[in-house]
Image (cartoon, coloured by chain):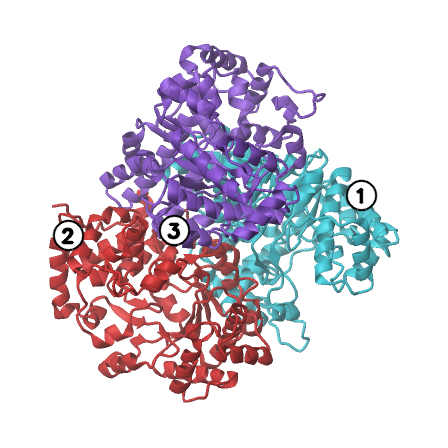
Chain colours: A cyan, B purple, C red
Amino acid sequence: MDRLELHPDRALPAEPGVRAIARRLYRRTADLPLVCMHGHVDAAVLAADAPFGDPAQLLVVPDHYVTRMLMSQGIPAARIGIPSADPDAPVETDPRAIWRLFCENWHLYRGTPSRYWLEHELVEVFGVDEKPAATSADRLYDRIATALAQREYRPLALLDRFGIELLATTDPATSDLAAHEKLAAAGYRGRIIPTFRPDAVVRPDRPGWRADVELLGRLADVDTSGYVGYLEALRRRRRAFVDAGALATDHGHDTADTQPLSDDEAESIYRAGRDGRATPAQGRAFAAHLLFESARMSCADGLVMQLHPGVLRDHSDAIAAAHGPDRGFDIPVAAEFTRALRPLLQAFGHDPGLRLILFTVDETVYSRELAPLAGAYPSVRLGAPWWFLDSPDGMRRFRDAATETAGFANTSGFVDDTRAFASIPARHDLARRIDAGYLARVVAEHRLDEEEAAETAVDLAYHLPRTAYRRR
Amino acid sequence: MDRLELHPDRALPAEPGVRAIARRLYRRTADLPLVCMHGHVDAAVLAADAPFGDPAQLLVVPDHYVTRMLMSQGIPAARIGIPSADPDAPVETDPRAIWRLFCENWHLYRGTPSRYWLEHELVEVFGVDEKPAATSADRLYDRIATALAQREYRPLALLDRFGIELLATTDPATSDLAAHEKLAAAGYRGRIIPTFRPDAVVRPDRPGWRADVELLGRLADVDTSGYVGYLEALRRRRRAFVDAGALATDHGHDTADTQPLSDDEAESIYRAGRDGRATPAQGRAFAAHLLFESARMSCADGLVMQLHPGVLRDHSDAIAAAHGPDRGFDIPVAAEFTRALRPLLQAFGHDPGLRLILFTVDETVYSRELAPLAGAYPSVRLGAPWWFLDSPDGMRRFRDAATETAGFANTSGFVDDTRAFASIPARHDLARRIDAGYLARVVAEHRLDEEEAAETAVDLAYHLPRTAYRRR
Amino acid sequence: MDRLELHPDRALPAEPGVRAIARRLYRRTADLPLVCMHGHVDAAVLAADAPFGDPAQLLVVPDHYVTRMLMSQGIPAARIGIPSADPDAPVETDPRAIWRLFCENWHLYRGTPSRYWLEHELVEVFGVDEKPAATSADRLYDRIATALAQREYRPLALLDRFGIELLATTDPATSDLAAHEKLAAAGYRGRIIPTFRPDAVVRPDRPGWRADVELLGRLADVDTSGYVGYLEALRRRRRAFVDAGALATDHGHDTADTQPLSDDEAESIYRAGRDGRATPAQGRAFAAHLLFESARMSCADGLVMQLHPGVLRDHSDAIAAAHGPDRGFDIPVAAEFTRALRPLLQAFGHDPGLRLILFTVDETVYSRELAPLAGAYPSVRLGAPWWFLDSPDGMRRFRDAATETAGFANTSGFVDDTRAFASIPARHDLARRIDAGYLARVVAEHRLDEEEAAETAVDLAYHLPRTAYRRR
């Protein structure tokens, strides 16, 4: 048997002196609760609290980090069990076959954070003690499947076991929040909270936009046939989210553009969208305007604004058509924040009501734009490394590039930003190790005392996420 | 008492073998004179040679690195003692209160170079032996204030104590150089020298431009109502600066654009500026043209050209209106040099009269554009990490990214680029430590002999700044 | 005598624990054959198999990394022996003088990969045991010259001695492949192979384009007066290259743009080019279209596509006019791949016939664009660090930035991309050391087992280049 064990010093710097300091710093954070202020766990899954499916459905098929690697090596989506839009297209449905395929290809994940997180999950969550491989696939499958059937492995039980103090989901503006209501009734009010994401209703050029704004209007009990009603509907839904415990909004736009339109221009584009004739240029202009307006609304209702721009979604039409979104074919583009955010920050950057957290998948902006902005505007915080940058060296480069300009207090602390619920402890634990390592190096270079570093480590892991997102 | 001490190995690499080499290399540079070829110390302050003000006025209020951090955490500018344009706006005037506020917030500077430099200053310049904190603020204030009152703490006494061999100030083209004349008369000719910075007279779209070019004309005794006279005025003032000891010019433009205009185009824009109707586009075009013309002038008069582009100044109109410029709200943008500099380098890049030193706050251009340019054109040198990049890891990343393409000889050596006079030794010392660490790593990787590394360290600290700026 | 020796641990990480692992990993790759899937060794030189010229002609004059450094420090091209287009211009012709100049300036190469490679060549290839300097120049010259005269130092003998299993040259589409035929007849079929590079025939705005497409037509025995014939000529020459053993094409475009034209548009620009009136904009559009068409052709004939975009060639017209291309004045510009490649990848990204290898001199795109693309599309591989980035820290930063998103299996393995034949072993050896060091760090951080790392090291050095380029 090829034993799988987690080394206690994993992801800590190799140099023994620095490692010793990092160990001590990590120990100060290792057992802290998890504060998950931004993520994509499905609230309905938590509300239903049904056992998770099989190992393939939990760990492989829905995880685009995992499936992307297999597809990049020529393995067809069908073999990985990824459903197809074509009802006649064959797709692997046997979870053991999918799991075996994954285990046979375990070597592909060398050097990636997926490998790191999965090892942590397998050992710490599922008690696996053997490396994934063709020869061990079935044994691993059985162990995980057996565990998943147990009461202790239901979502809400894991929420406690993982030490999750607070978990924020991400929910469309048109969500009816039924899942959160159910969870609130079950005692999770304030512990599982929604996040207001209006992306689907800010691009009038989108095919589904009109239906979505009509739904928005129905939920808000406001006529959204016009722009003014639409804004009121947004305000009312935001209030509903606040009542349901929301602390933040989220905006995943193509760019960070915040150029406001005049009311006339906004209304004009809105009408064009209602008539199904809005152009992409109008759509982008309207989205930028809505970022500006969202900041205004945040000043009023206190919801923290998160901005996640700069990803070209569905780079491959073929993949999107066959398998839908979020299949690993979202590719970043170069980001610009300094000019793009200026209209918003000119208007609201010093408003005590605004808190704006900035994320990027273009790491060139850390030292050039985001750290200088976060290190100046009282409303701005620099968000944790996002997506492709949420990895051991990605996180290390983040601290290296951003800290000297922004300090620590202007950053958001760690967010896991994941849909993969069972990976949450692994992600937070890795971030704590990487931050311990960075701080240890600064201590070893005599630029910080160890006690200051320990305080900072606890801030990064626990206090900063709470204060950045205004957790009262 | 929480003791403040400077560890002798601070900012040196943590790994013991590399650290041992770094220590030895650092020792070869630690006591070298300081050559300060670019900075913003006020020549009038040196000429007056009056005692520095109180600790708050010396170390807090004018330092935008320091005040920016406090403001980013929501502390109003007024509490920090930053003057307001509004005469009725209350502003803290008690220096002890300002100093106490700073000390109470000392923790915010963890991980930043401000913390590093201030610790060095406090200990080495002011003999402080206690960490800044609420409880020590008054003791620190008293110690520093007592020191500042002594003769040995006057600017010119500190110039000697700091071992500053040469200090360049940065002066507008419209400076009358009175301060430098006074200093020359006092024996500082060639030791405190001006730098010619024509920024205020190169943007005809600027509100104050016309008045500034008229002043330029008066100082040069040339009629600057037309473009030809304006160029002659620039040449004459440059000569005056040369006579006063200047070795360089400085240009802080939005971009590195050097596209020349025809004489007709230039004259046309100049006239538009005189008439107060020049557009921003015309202003930018004229500034680019003036960079080109400045290179031509440098080929004739030998002044070294420095270029500091890529910062969007006064990102927040509100802050600029209330508190003026240089309050921490200057934010970098992505920079482009390869195409932008091509007109200038095509025309003058091989002229033995030209020396062009390039600085950036966008570190992506180090390996991509600046090192290739400096590693090819004999006139080009790669300047020291600027502003946000002038920090321990920022400087390390610079050497890491630039050296393998440009080598060492094509770089400028360290410049402190600071207004904060008392921080100059700290900044040079930090750079010497970081360079020692970088070189030590290359030695430890057996890619350089230690003796070569020591020679190089001395070059970087002392010889290169002198040769890059053509110090005879 | 100042002894020159190669330290056995050179370029391995300094930290002793990591170094010990790196040594072991390196040992697993050190003696592997060299697979040189992309480079610029002149096939005619190999076919002639004549002794290399003198040391200056071998190691100095044709090496733009070497000559660039000297020129950047003000040494005129003429003194370095670089020929001039002006027949009356004096140029140094004495190889000893050129060699002495180089040795006197050896110190300029501190910290550069040129220094590293040259040390390796001098010691391992030529048995030199003394450092280059003014005092040793003649002794070194004699030793190298003596060696070069020996049979064992002829190109094909060195091919064997270097352990080169396969060497790909880069050849214009208009090459008659005579050199490769001669080599095939001499037994080197499949061991020295051409690479199809159509750059000269894809820019109808180029002065020499028309003559080149006529030559293409003659070689292909197709009338290329029209666009359809031109495409057929490309297909036929590609087939001739395949018959001669080619595995790949190479495309060195200004940008990665792959926007296809309609047939009408393409024909129209082609005609304009034939008439000598194509504009640069048309030239660029046609080149982008040809990248798209090249991918289509690759799906049919299986040639692997390499893309090397983003370098502004001949930045200095003066240098290009006087000394021709490739004199060190090619300067990178910011690159964009995500949008630029989308048309090609939409059409062919999932075609099993396509393999696309992407190179960059803009390292910001590693984590942002190239690793995400290579980590998604089955046809895409991330190429080895190119040109300015092919250096110890450049390669290290590459693995640091790319691995966590793309993994290892989606990268191409090392390619030397050099014209300097005698430097090939040094370059591969350096890459093996750097990869060993990177892997050792990941092992030391307990994120990979040492045996997995060793397998990966062998993949990176040997297997991946073969599979990436579809070496059967």
Count the marks: how many?
3
Q: Residues within 10 Å of mark 1 (few under 14, many from 20)?
A: some
User: Which residue is the site of mark 1?
Assistant: A239
Residue B464 horizontal side relative to residue C92, left or right: right
C303 to A66, vertically: above or below: below
Q: Is residue C189 visible?
A: no
Between B371 and C412, the one lying in front of the other is: B371
Instruction: Provide the chain ID for the residue under circle 1.
Output: A
Query: Same chain, marks 1 and 2?
Result: no
User: Which residue is the site of mark 3?
Assistant: B349
Residue A435 horizontal side relative to residue A243, left or right: left
Q: Residue type at mark 2: give it.
A: Ala
User: Which residue is the site of mark 2?
Assistant: C137
Q: Alpha-carbon distance for marks 3 and 2? A: 31 Å
Q: Residue at x 39, y 22 (%)?
A: B184
C272 to A226, vertically: above or below: below
